[in-house]
Image (cartoon, coloured by chain):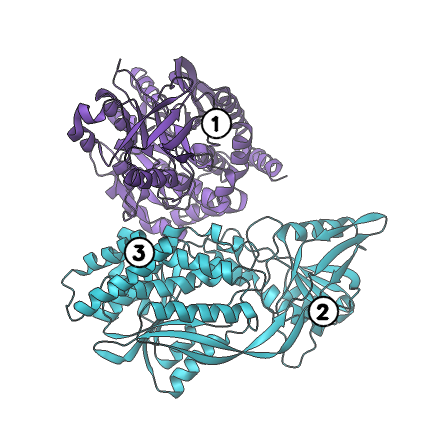
Chain colours: A purple, B cyan
Amino acid sequence: MRRLLCLLFVFAAQAALAADSTEPSRTTQQETINRIFADALAHGCAYDQLRELVARYPGRLGGSSNLDGAIGWAQHQLTSLGVDRVFTQDVTVPHWERGAPESVTLLRPGEPPVPLNALALGGTIATPAEGLTAPVIEVRSLADVEALGREKIAGKIVFYNRPMDPTIFRTSTAYSQAGDQRNHGPALAARFGATAVLVRSLTLAHDDVPHTGTTSFGAGQERIPALALSTLAADVLSAALVRNPDATVRVVSHARLLPDAPSHNIIGEWRGSERPDEIIVVGGHLDSWDVAPGAHDDGTGVVAAMEVLRLFKSLDLRPRHTLRCVLFTSEENSGNGGKRYAQLARVSGEKHLFAIESDNGGFAPAGFNLGNPAGDAHERAARWRSLFEPWGVWHFQKGSGGADVGPLIKEGATVAGLMPDSQRYFDYHHTRADTIDHVNPRELHLGAAALAALIWLIDTEGL
Amino acid sequence: MRRLLCLLFVFAAQAALAADSTEPSRTTQQETINRIFADALAHGCAYDQLRELVARYPGRLGGSSNLDGAIGWAQHQLTSLGVDRVFTQDVTVPHWERGAPESVTLLRPGEPPVPLNALALGGTIATPAEGLTAPVIEVRSLADVEALGREKIAGKIVFYNRPMDPTIFRTSTAYSQAGDQRNHGPALAARFGATAVLVRSLTLAHDDVPHTGTTSFGAGQERIPALALSTLAADVLSAALVRNPDATVRVVSHARLLPDAPSHNIIGEWRGSERPDEIIVVGGHLDSWDVAPGAHDDGTGVVAAMEVLRLFKSLDLRPRHTLRCVLFTSEENSGNGGKRYAQLARVSGEKHLFAIESDNGGFAPAGFNLGNPAGDAHERAARWRSLFEPWGVWHFQKGSGGADVGPLIKEGATVAGLMPDSQRYFDYHHTRADTIDHVNPRELHLGAAALAALIWLIDTEGL
């Protein structure tokens, strides 16, 4: 029902636009920004689109049929928004599969085995079919592994158990600080002869939900099995190792790397009325982890970017510059979608004025991070702070956008990322719990409106 | 386990305090505020206390045994926080009971009856045991009822169906604007001879969860049954009335008003080291609606107020003024707890410097509303904005605190209310869905830290 209304709304808006496309806005900036937010809150379609995306195509990992299905779905959505053209870019992406469910089991002489909730990390390999069993050495950092050296590490399972720092306000900062354990810990342990790696899940939640994610090995380096333990399972293992230093763990994983697969970025383009050769991008990434419905990460970024186009249409805000909704592929396990988009922009000599993405969840927007070659984009944008404050958006900080639009800064673009409230994001990030019921429609629609408002200001006034 | 850690933490902090109670803080204001927030995020006990409160004493409505149980629980909690004294104030409160479950059924000739999810409103009365059946007249406002007059209203069920305005950013504003239908609509309809009233639930969520709340009748006025319909049920009824204007509805309610009951405000007091005769209050209300676990409303306010004391203890921030944690009774259906506290302050000549409450849910804090006799409290407090912004708190607006501390402004106090993110609050407000799983521990603990930080600034620097 609401979905139907959404479509009707788009068509009605297009009709109005056709009838009146040259009429300039006579409202003040604040009035226009208020109209953008009010329209998103009253008529936003992003939540209904998100429900459809995650219900039909959960687990949209590179190389999967669900990612291919989501790409087709996105093309249809963009086409029905009535943009001037919808096109794709070929992108080669890694193809990794989890295979049959993994397992991690704590073994102590004379005690029953204890299953520990775990998920294999993207890019890792399988154990022997019967699994591998080895003693465990717990560490808090990569430096610990360096210090212990090969004689202490070889033949063991290395267990990285440094928690995210709960005292940091922005959870993405705590995530980055603890992230070296997952991103580079397995490769380092492998160099010292570890047989496998366990990593404490990157979350501030204290529960039994394991969080997957990617890990990197050197080119040509021999890979080893590596899995993330839920934070509760990590605490169980850590406590057991204190009482039984000779406890062992059996790890079973069926993960495998397949040959790279073809994929695509999807682009919906609306030609600018005055400067069609200067491009503004709003984007999100279509892919998600295999076990995750990918509601917050990054279904919300995808539907928010499409909602920006709907808002411009429905409010008759014809962009002066060319406005592109870019839905990137393979952010999760390669970043190849964003790199490919920037590479093609360079070779084709496209001028990108501004590129913004939403990839921190669909929570209530608090601000933006901005970066440009001159390093002053965040200060320039802060002059608009009073226009945003009535809608709860107040923070403008220096940054580099996100993984997908970040590469465009080298092409001279100003890049940005939406900064929603960050407290809940890592409760769901890269898990089976990244579901639609954890997304609030108003918070999602406020975020889409914040993207549209900043784009409208840059399109009409320039940064 | 964590609960135990919380208690140990308090005792350790008290020991430290005893050993070092005269040592002045040498940290800068920003350093102290950062310590407050970091301690709340790393060691906050509010969430664990909340889990205990809502598990043991859900449905804490005035006159209920669960409210009495919660009062005893709160006394124990405050005592174990090591305050100088814990005392109570006698408060007489309304005693209303829902009785057996209510029902609302749509009846149309030749069609099967359709049950409509509903909850009786506090203060309303029962229908006859077999229920009452009458035609329904849908209105959008109290003015509609005035305009229709007795001849159109008498003998009918009046159905107030004006939704909350989704385009307003602060949901509490939209709630207030639509609230006249629930607060005063039944009394008005009764004066025109309506047999019963149905009201669209006060929420922006589009679901089948009815939201109860209080409604007022004139002194001595004859009351009628009045119930809130879920927003989906309201839409079903509205659509049915378009197709079948002669549809009727059967309402069954067993609600009843009992004689007023005794209850209590609970106060934990920590004497000021320099100005013990000047009082600072931090509070929340212990009561909740009968069907609601009362996690957000207002369990979070209760445990956040207690967390403020824990933070002052654990960080050795000895208050110069007397600091009281006041847990008010009967906010939901009378406001008598807050009125009684202010009345006793006046008769005993207590000087209240500052009083703040949290009664808008345990979501991430965005700011404060402040009011004082001079009307400039929010401008004065805004000078501290830069101290709060690193923790996401940036907004200082004029206001009057909340229902419980508001009456103290007449006694010369500066009053304030915490303003958390408001987008999700009315999804749960006054419903069975106001449960612990909708509270995020970090958001709750950030709110408690914001309360403690503002109180510490006012205690040390003055407003």
**Quarter of the image that includes the C terminus of chain A:** top left
Q: How many marks?
A: 3
Relative to A456, B164 lies left or right = right
Q: Is residue B63 above or below residue A365?
A: below
* Disc 2 secondary structure class: loop
Q: Which mark is residue A59?
A: 1
**What x and y, as percent, mark residue A269?**
44, 25
Q: Rounded to the nearest whole Å, what is the CA distance between mark 3 and mark 2? A: 46 Å
Q: Rounded to the nearest whole Å, what is the CA distance between mark 2 and mark 1? A: 52 Å
Q: Which residue is mark 3?
A: B40
Along the line of sight, the residue nearer the viewer: B304 or B120: B304
Q: At x 45% / y 59%, what residue is drawn?
A: B52
**What x and y, as percent, mark residue B190?**
70, 72
- Tags 3 and 2 in contact by the CB under 8 Å rule? no
Chain under numbered label 3: B
Relative to B157, B388 lies left or right = left
Mark whose residue sits in front, 3 or 2: 3
Q: Earlier in the sequence, mark 3 or mark 2?
A: 3
* Disc 1 secondary structure class: loop
Q: Is residue B47 above or below residue B398?
A: above
Q: Rounded to the nearest whole Å, what is the CA distance between mark 1 and mark 3? A: 36 Å
The answer to which image quadrant residue A368 occupies is top left
Mark whose residue sits in front, 1 or 3: 3
Relative to B338, A403 lies left or right = left
Q: Is residue A187 above or below residue B140?
A: above
